[in-house]
Amino acid sequence: MRRLLLVSALAAALCGPAFAQAPDAGALAAAVDADVLAWRRDIHQNPELGNREVRTSALVAGHLRALGFEDVRTGIATTGVTAVLRGGKPGPRIALRADMDALPVTERTGLPFASKATAEFRGETVGVMHACGHDAHTAILMGVAQALSTVREDLSGEILFIFQPAEEGPPDGEEGGAEEMLRQGIFERFKPEAVFGLHVFSTLNAGTVGYRSGPLMAASDRFNIVIKGRQTHGSRPWGGVDPIVAAADVIGTAQTIVSRRQNISKQPVVVSFGAIKGGIRYNIIPDEVELVGTIRTFDEGMRQQVFADLRNVAEKVAAAHGATTVAQVPDTKGNPVTVNHPALTARMVPSLEKAVGAANVVEMDLNMGAEDFSYYAREVPGFFFFVGATPPGQDPLKAPSNHSPEFFLDEQALKVGTRAMLQVALDYLHEID
């Protein structure tokens, strides 16, 4: 009988469950929900632009030190913070990332903790708002760190926590964001085998999580076009060269780059103008007009062709008006396509379903938004997912979008994000290969 029991025990060990015993993600999340909510509201009320997240990074670093994390580093890529949590058992190494920066947007949500902050941006005083939800990302990852710290002895493996500045791009003339974090060696000091991130998103209802295997978010590039004319009195346009009329023609003609020059049956492409600056008085035709905007693509060949076409349009159309052009297309190094590693995605989707229910996990279309999480996912397999932000019952396609001054986060998303990230991390760490 004893021999039979030993054989049965050995068989159970060899053919046992696919996962080692892991802590309960739901219970861990419930214990930090109130703190996550408080952190999110505090960060929301005190937003900071990219590379200026001084208060936010101090809050994060103090929290990680209080939890007893190892190797807490600050000042990475200007204001970034990293720290390591080592489990009590051997296992994989993973990285979890949140972004901390806000946007130059004046808030119009009417929330009791709405931002009243202002800052300087491109030479102007602007309102500052967490109009993209990075306050939620930071608070969620702070909560995940706290939850996991309470069960560190039961954890198998090690986790690098990354709190990143300037995901929306650093100020002009500065370096920043994910690429700079990597350049300063965060993956050289700690070599993860996978990296995970999330983003709250207005086009999904709260309670829902979205994902996509392979390409998820577009490559993003900026452009800057300056059209130079010759100033004259508004009553005598023939006495100069009108860069405003030339700029209007450039903008109109540029719309044909996508509609007539790109094979959008292959991959989607977007060219958008985001700002026009020129002139200061009603009766003076100015010397020059500046146009800035963004290009979004998924295919490198199409990306390069758009660059060439936009430069050509800017130069030739302006020349037809007698104006000259300085066209920087692109004007900085952009973000590459964000790609979810297919095998890692297939492995982690069941974790999302476990966290929020299979009916609440949806596969998404290609997203023309961009994310510099793409740089991490080029170094190691990455998995990036969306957490719904729009209140249930409200049409998410009509809700104020991310980057809107009225962007509204249903705070149920905080609970969903915390549970989803905890489940993903725990399942990865405790899965038996």
Image: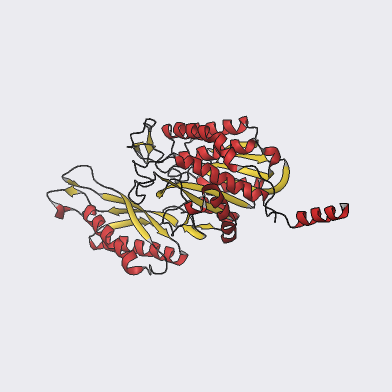
What is the count of numbered marks? 0
- Location of residue 424 in the rendering, given as x and y in whole percent from the top left corner: 58, 49
User: Residue 289 or 429: which is nearer the viewer?
Assistant: 429
Residue 162 falls in which quadrant of the image? top right
Q: Residue at x 65, y 39 (%)?
A: 85
Q: Residue furthest left?
A: 235
User: Residue 112 or 360: which is nearer the viewer?
Assistant: 360
Against 59, is 408 above or below?
A: below
Against 103, is 276 above or below?
A: below
Residue 316 falls in which quadrant of the image? bottom left
Q: Residue at x 52, y 50 (%)?
A: 357
Say whether residue 276 is left or right of residue 33. Answer: left
State how the image is colored. secondary structure
Say whether residue 338 is left or right of residue 274. Answer: right
Say whether residue 196 is left or right of residue 226. Answer: right
Against 147, is 208 above or below?
A: below
Which part of the image, by quadrant, shows the C terminus?
bottom right
- Whether residue 75 is visible, yes or no, is no
Say whether residue 249 is left or right of residue 420. Answer: left
- Location of residue 237 in the rendering, given as x and y in whole percent from the top left corner: 15, 53
- Location of residue 149 in the rendering, given as x and y in whole percent from the top left corner: 64, 36
- Location of residue 380 in the rendering, given as x and y in whole percent from the top left corner: 60, 55
- Whether residue 268 is visible, yes or no, is yes
